[in-house]
Amino acid sequence: LKYRDVKSMSPWKGWKSHEWLDYPITPVITCRGCVHNCTFCGGSRNALALYCNRKRPAFRDPHLIAQDITKIARFTRAPIFVIGDLLQPGTDYAYTILEELERRKLTNHLVFELFTPAPREFFDRVAASVEHFNFEISPDSHDARIRAAEGKHYTNEQIEQNLSWALDAGCNKFDLFFMIGLPQQTCTSAMETVEWCGQLMGTFGTRVVPFILPYSPFIDPGCIAYEQSEQLGYKILLTTFEEYRTALLAPSWKYALNYETNWMTRDEIVACAYRAGLRLNELKHACGLIADEAFTETKERIHRAIELTATVDELMALDNHSLRQERLRALKPEFDALFESVTHEKVQLDWPASKRSLRLLPLLAAAIRDSLPIRKR
């Protein structure tokens, strides 16, 4: 305000469509810690106990969560992402939050996480409390055996039930996240996961949006897969701070991966990610989830990424260090533009929002109010 230059104060990239100022999605944190113990998660129960000395999760007061959501809704019409499964501490906790939200009559899209499938009543309670709502869950694989190996114990039938219940209740969008690089997972299995995604889109329509990505770039230090890597079939490739620092500067995300598995090498994980991305792109197009232009752009982007990955492999094999660095620097602008979002359009991750979502005057008023000294009465 002092220099009449609000743009320079923004820490987010650009003023284009789908950048933060046009799409000011805001998170609300509901807890610290987690009751679950997924093998690859740096926020799991074991990881936080080991690295943060947190023996159990701490859940915020339900009334404060509802209050935060209401405050955010005063200055933005964009989606509000409620981080953390509200059902972790039990249904009483979750329903208390929903009752608070129902009284506040919000019009923003709210996004709720599920760590495990929820009971049908939960979706009905959400629908009764919130006008616009979305969900996401990370089954990671279509194979319940692989899912169990990473610490998630539920069935495909439960997932499909949740999709049906949520959509029947009025859910606008239900995101499903799948991973490549899991224990006991081969590329054949990953491709079978993609085909299951196609079946789900065919059954439930375009409100179900699946994604499949490699677990990258790092398996988190502290998680079970890192600390007990050999038992779970992982080989950790980076161990020192210097190795991680160098990996972050790597010309391709392939060279930043800090692991491979007994079932897939690092090369195979990368190749499988592109293969899965191409097939899922085809299935999304066939189901009507993406238009012709987006389908073609994603397909071309993946093929170009495959070409660039091969080029990087050739350059990394050069003995002449100076020549290698010179040629890698020449490719860097294209790398940066391409690898921001390779296997899917970034907009697919967006939840519904109106244009001009940011309410600048209420935001400015709140900033001024918060900056004023508190007067003692």
Image: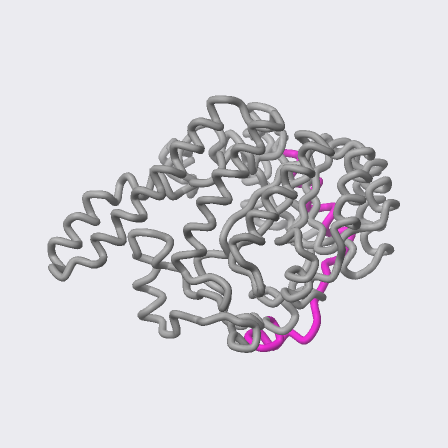
Of residues 73 and 225, the one nearer the viewer is 225
User: 249 or 257: which is nearer to us?
Assistant: 257
Residue drawn at 78 percent across, 49 percent down: 157
Count of picture labels: 0
Q: Is residue 355 left or right of residue 294?
A: right
Residue 149 visible in the shown view: yes
Against 152, residue 233 (above or below) is below
Expressed as whole percent of the image width and height from the top left, the position of residue 129 reads 82, 38
Magenta segment main secondary structure? helix
Residue 364 in sight from this viewpoint: no
**Residues drawn in magenta:** 48-75
Residue 209 x/y as whole percent: 63, 37
Check the picture and name the quadrant holding the N terminus.
top left
Outermost residue to the front: 188
Residue 318 is left or right of residue 274, and the answer is: left
Indicate how the structure is coloured in the image: one colour
Q: Could you say where residue 34 lies in the image, as x and y percent from the top left? A: 68, 64
Q: Position of residue 227 (x, y in %)?
A: 53, 76
Q: Residue shown at 51%/29% (left/top)?
A: 22
In front: 111, or 104? 111
Asked if residue 367 lies in the magenta stretch, the reply is: no
The image shows residue 284, relative to residue 68, as above or below, that is: above
Residue 69 magenta = yes
Classify residue 307 by image quadrant. top left
**Does residue 329 appear left or right of residue 114 in this picture?**
left
Residue depicted at x 37% and y 59%: 256
Q: Residue at x 49, y 64 (%)?
A: 219
Instruction: Answer with the quarter of the image where residue 239 lies.
Output: bottom left
